[in-house]
Image (cartoon, rainbow, N blue to C red):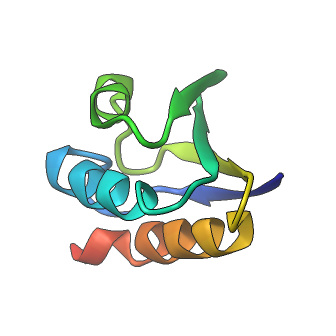
C-alpha cells in the first residue's frame, strides 16, 4: 500500500466535475483507492461516495492505493489533486 496526504486547494473542493474526472482516471487501474477524510475511508472509485463526503477547499485528505500499479495510481491521483483539478 502507498499513501500520500493532501490539502484540497481548488475553490469548489471535490465537487461534481473533479469527482467525475478523478473516478474516470482511477477506474483504469486494477488497484483499490481509498480517500481518508474526517476519520472515514471513502471509495475513490465511487462518484457518489466522493460527492457525499463534502470535501471542500482546505480539506485535509489522505489517498491510499493498494494493489497492482498502486504507485502509478497514486502518482496520477496526486497530480490531479495538486493541480487543483485544473481549476486554478
How many discs mark residues in the rendered view? 0
The image quadrant of residue 41 is top right
In the rendering, at what x and y percent does residue 88 appear? 25, 77
Q: Is residue 60 visible?
A: yes
In the rendering, at what x and y percent does residue 16 appear? 17, 45
| Residue occupying the point 35% across, 51% down | 23
| Residue occupying the point 48% across, 42% down | 44
Instruction: Classify residue 63 as left or right of residue 1.
Output: left
In the rendering, at what x and y percent does residue 35 appear? 57, 40
Q: Nearer the viewer, residue 35 or 33?
A: 33
| Residue occupying the point 45% across, 66% down | 81
Q: Is residue 74 above or below residue 64?
A: below
Instruction: Classify residue 56 as left or right of residue 66.
Output: left
Q: Is residue 79 above or below residue 33?
A: below
Q: Is residue 20 above or below residue 87?
A: above
In the rendering, at what x and y percent does residue 17 appear? 16, 55
Instruction: Classify residue 25 as left or right of residue 88.
Output: right
User: Residue lying farthest left?
Assistant: 17
Q: Is residue 83 above or below residue 13?
A: below
Instruction: Classify residue 70 as left or right of residue 60.
Output: right
The image quadrant of residue 70 is bottom right
Q: Is residue 38 visible?
A: no
User: Residue lying farthest right?
Assistant: 1
| Residue occupying the point 72% across, 61% down | 68
Amino acid at each position: 500500500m502507498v499513501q500520500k496526504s493532501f490539502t484540497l486547494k481548488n475553490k469548489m473542493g471535490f465537487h461534481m466535475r473533479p469527482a467525475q474526472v478523478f473516478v474516470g482516471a482511477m477506474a483504469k487501474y486494477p488497484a483499490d483507492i481509498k480517500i481518508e477524510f474526517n476519520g472515514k475511508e471513502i471509495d475513490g472509485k465511487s462518484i457518489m461516495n466522493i460527492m457525499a463526503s463534502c470535501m471542500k477547499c482546505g480539506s485535509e485528505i489522505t489517498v491510499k492505493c493498494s494493489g497492482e500499479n498502486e504507485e502509478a495510481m497514486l502518482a496520477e491521483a496526486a497530480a490531479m489533486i495538486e493541480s487543483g483539478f485544473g481549476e486554478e
